[in-house]
Structures are given as C-alpha cells and as structure tokens.
C-alpha cells in the first residue's frame, strides 16, 4: 500500500499499542506517525471522573509513552480545560506537524461524538482527513439489530444475535505495529494538568499494557475455571479485576475474548462453565456500550424507561451521607461502600446490593448514587456504570423488575456466609458473632458502636413498590 507522508493518532480511551485499530491503520498507511493525548480536566470534572481514575489515566499515559517510544512514535500532550478548545488545538498541531490525516478510535457519549464532529470540521477546513474506527466494541454499534431493524433493549436476544453475527465474521486482533523508521520520539513528562490526587493506594492497580496482560494471564490460568462458582463471593479474589484496564482501553476486549476462547477450546457458550460465564460478562459490557450508542438519552442523565421519569424519589441528605460513609446499619451494604471509598473498586455483586439499597429501599434518585460511584471508581466507565445503576433502579434497559429487591440480609447470608468480607471492610464487626452480623440492630452490634439499621426493610420495600407500581401499569 502506498504510504502517505505524515499522520497523527489521537489516543483517548484506548491507551495501548496492541490491537489498536487507529494506530495500526495509521502506521500501515503513513511513513511518519505522531501520537497525541488531550487532557481536559474541566471536562473530566463535569463528567464526574474520580481522582482515582484520572491518576490511572496519567500513569497509563506514561506507560503508553514508553511503548510508543519502542515504535519510534513521539507522543505529544495537549492540556486544555474542556472539549471546546480541541478543534483549534488539533487543527494547529496538525498544521505544525504537516499531517495529512488524523486517526482515532470512536467514543460513544453524546459530548464525545459532538466533540469529534467539531474536530472533523476543523480538520476538513485545512484539507486534513479524519479516520475514526469502532475499536472498543467487538461489533460496531448499530450492526446488532432486531429483525425489525431496531436496537436491542434486552440482553439475551442481543447476545444471541451478537453471537450469530460473529459466527459469520469472526473477530481478529491487530498485532502491535512494527517500529517506524527515522522518527526521534519525545517522551512526554505529562506534567501540566491539575486534578485532585488519588485517594487510594494506587499500587493495587499497576499501570500499563504489560500489567493488564499479566493480570489477564493470571486470571485465565488460576481463576477462569472456577469463575462461575466463585464470582459472586466477595470475600474471595475470584474475579478478573480487569475492569479498570478495559475501561481505559489498556487492554482490548478482543484480547480477553481471545484468551477465554483459547481456554475454552473455541466454545462461546458450552465447555468450561467458568469460561463461558466470563464470556457472558464481557458481552454484557458490549451490550451496555451498544445501548449508550443507540439511546443518547442515557448519556444525558435520563432514565432509559420514560415511564420512570417521574418516580417520586426521596431526598434525605442524612440518609445519603450514611449510605456514602457505609453507616447504614446493614453490614453488606456498609462493607461495599467502604471498599469503594478505600480501594476505588467494589465487587460486582455488592455493587448491585448497594445500588438497589439506595434506589429501592431508601428510594433515592439513582443518579445521585451513580455520580457517587463515578467520583470514586478507578473503573468509572459511563456505559457500564450507568447500565448497572439503571438496572438496579428498574429504570433502564433489561432492568430488574421494579418489584425485585435484593435483600441486603439475604444477600449477605448467601454470598458471604461466614461474614469474612464484611469483617474485612467493617472492622468494628471483626469480633462479632456471625449470626449477630446477620441480625442488624441486635444489642451486641450496637454495643460495638455499629449503627442501628437506617430503615425497616419490610416497610421500605412496600414504599418502593407503591412508588413504582403506577409507572409500571
């Protein structure tokens, strides 16, 4: 293929050189490639990104710069307050470098899509080509549709159709490009943007592609076979913990599927139960991304189900503060909230329990909880976080029926039967008897300084059912 002079690759939520569509295409078609990352602290604040996530971005950028250096690709850094400055900034950088084309991988939030339209127009004014790829999903959003041509609103038929399409056109991973000749890379220091410091021990989330691939390998070798049996037990380290890396594109979902399929002898749904179960979870991530692309209202802080727009949410700041601090008097809820604040991550089963406790038992607006999660999560991905919250609140696509409430007591007895997870994150209960831990409000817990239950679960359940019943009619 004839190579054109110079190209610019704009990295966003794809901080890797392996299996990167935009980078591979640029280096295949151009003799000289430069990379750029655009830090937008003001935009991140408006989008609610946690300091933990921004710290993870910064650390992964430093690793990406080293990987690009091996390819002899310089990485430049643009720091502006928000997206509005990017068209002029990227137009100016492209003119200075003399590039003929800019390559990027698409992001699907409404603000990001509008940003790209404006950048594309600014580049076109200088006769600079714009090439954007659907890299983060396995299948392009909009390509997985019902027989009537509509986007899917329920996971199971989406998965069925998704698998049918892949059977006819299997995915393939792009190899890391070969180093280019002649370029002298400049290793950016990534100084210059201000954001609050991380609030967690960042060593638990090592940065870079090598760390992500090692984590995947360790999980496949040591955890994948037992994943289905153990994934719901928060006391065990039985999940992949790859979500922060997937959310920033430090590793691609295709590499994860490739590893799972290799382990499972090419089987998507049969074979080893753990492997097929984890593949199913990866398809859930895909589903939420397709929903985000097909229904822009979920990017605009709106419920997916229009009939839930007027649910009479309660507003009690003291209750919300106790939920945030892990002082609700329900040990599993409190353990999850304390894990979130301390580590920037929460076990997925417990995410559902804590989210449903806030949105159903307390009847607080799910958007407030969604924002609190985003303000702490190192893996705070809009599509996945919004999808999970709307599922729990019964306002979203494929959501839990409004009358389904996960009891924080039953969930604790079932998935943390020895209260090991609870004791780890609620240390005042470390010496409490297990049977007392499952009886919130018991005198022995109160004597340890643990708070009384915030609500009566039976009364709170009836309140939630009454609030939702008219909307479901």
Image (tube, rainbow, N blue to C red):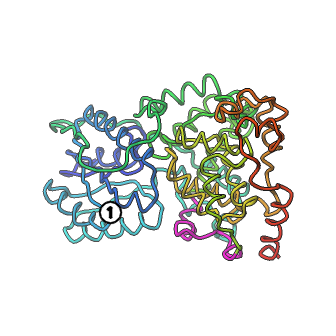
Image: 407 above or below 18: below
Query: Picture quarter containing residue 312?
Result: bottom right
Q: Nearer the viewer, residue 221 or 440?
A: 440
Q: Nearer the viewer, residue 163 or 91?
A: 91
Q: Quadrant of the C terminus?
A: bottom right
Residue at left offset 41%, top offset 34% = 207
Give the residue at mark 1. 82
Q: How many marks?
A: 1
| Left or right: residue 155 compared with residue 10 | right
Query: Mark 1 Cα within 10 Å, few/some/many (few <14, many 20+)?
Result: some
Q: Is residue 299 magenta?
A: yes
Q: Is residue 338 magenta?
A: no
Residue at left offset 42%, top offset 57% = 106
Q: Nearer the viewer, residue 206 or 460?
A: 460
| Extreme residue toward the front, this view | 447
Image: 334 above or below 301: above
- Specify the principal SS of the magenta part: helix
Query: Picture quarter containing residue 383?
Result: bottom right
Residue at left offset 23%, top offset 63% = 128
Give how far across and how far down residue 326 sits, in percent. 64, 46
Query: Picture quarter containing residue 132?
Result: bottom left
Give how far across and how far down residue 299 sits, in percent. 52, 66
- Disc 1, SS: loop
Q: Nearer the viewer, residue 162 or 222?
A: 222
Image: 399 above or below 342: below
Give how far across and how far down residue 415 sits, in percent. 78, 36
Give how far across and how far down residue 29 sits, in percent. 28, 48
Magenta segment? 290-310
């Amino acid at each position: 293929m004839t190579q054109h002079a110079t190209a610019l690759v704009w990295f966003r939520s794809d901080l890797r050189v392996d299996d990167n569509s935009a980078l591979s295409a640029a280096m295949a078609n151009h003799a000289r490639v430069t990379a750029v990352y655009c830090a937008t602290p003001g935009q991140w604040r408006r989008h609610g990104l946690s300091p933990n996530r921004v710290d993870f971005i910064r650390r992964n950028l430093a690793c990406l710069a080293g990987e690009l250096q091996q390819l002899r690709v310089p990485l430049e850094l643009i720091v502006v307050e928000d997206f509005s400055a990017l068209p002029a900034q990227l137009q100016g950088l492209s003119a200075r470098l003399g590039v003929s084309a800019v390559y990027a991988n698409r992001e699907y939030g409404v603000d990001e899509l509008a940003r790209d339209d404006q950048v594309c127009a600014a580049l076109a004014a200088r006769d600079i080509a714009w090439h954007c790829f659907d890299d983060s999903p396995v299948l392009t959003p909009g390509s997985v549709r019902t027989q009537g041509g509509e986007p899917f609103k329920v996971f199971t038929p989406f998965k069925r159709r998704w698998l049918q399409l892949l059977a006819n056109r299997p995915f393939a991973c792009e190899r890391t490009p070969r180093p280019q000749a002649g370029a002298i890379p400049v290793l950016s220091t990534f100084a210059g943007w201000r954001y609050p410091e991380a609030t967690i021990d960042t060593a638990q989330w090592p940065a870079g592609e090598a760390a992500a691939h090692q984590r995947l390998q360790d999980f496949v070798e040591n955890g994948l076979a037992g994943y289905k049996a153990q994934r719901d037990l928060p006391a065990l380290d039985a999940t992949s913990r790859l979500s922060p890396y997937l959310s920033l594109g430090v590793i691609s979902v295709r590499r994860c599927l490739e590893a799972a399929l290799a382990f499972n002898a090419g089987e998507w749904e049969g074979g080893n139960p753990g492997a097929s179960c984890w593949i199913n979870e990866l398809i859930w991530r895909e589903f939420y991304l397709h929903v985000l692309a097909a229904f822009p209202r979920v990017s605009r802080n709106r419920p997916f189900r229009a009939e839930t727009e007027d649910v009479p949410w309660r507003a009690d700041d003291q209750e919300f503060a106790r939920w945030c601090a892990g002082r609700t008097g329900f040990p599993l809820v409190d353990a999850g909230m304390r894990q979130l604040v301390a580590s920037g991550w929460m076990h997925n089963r417990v995410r559902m329990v804590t989210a449903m406790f806030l949105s159903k038992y307390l009847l607080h607006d799910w958007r407030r909880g969604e924002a609190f999660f985003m303000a702490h999560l190192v893996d705070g991905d809009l599509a996945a976080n919004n999808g999970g919250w709307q599922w729990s609140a019964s306002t979203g696509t494929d959501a839990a029926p409004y009358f389904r409430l996960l009891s924080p007591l039953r969930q604790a007895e079932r998935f943390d039967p020895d209260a090991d997870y609870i004791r780890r994150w609620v240390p005042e209960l470390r010496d409490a008897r297990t049977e007392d831990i499952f009886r919130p409000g018991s005198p022995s817990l109160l004597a340890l300084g643990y708070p009384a239950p915030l609500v009566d679960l039976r009364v709170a359940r009836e309140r939630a059912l009454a609030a939702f019943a008219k909307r479901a009619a």
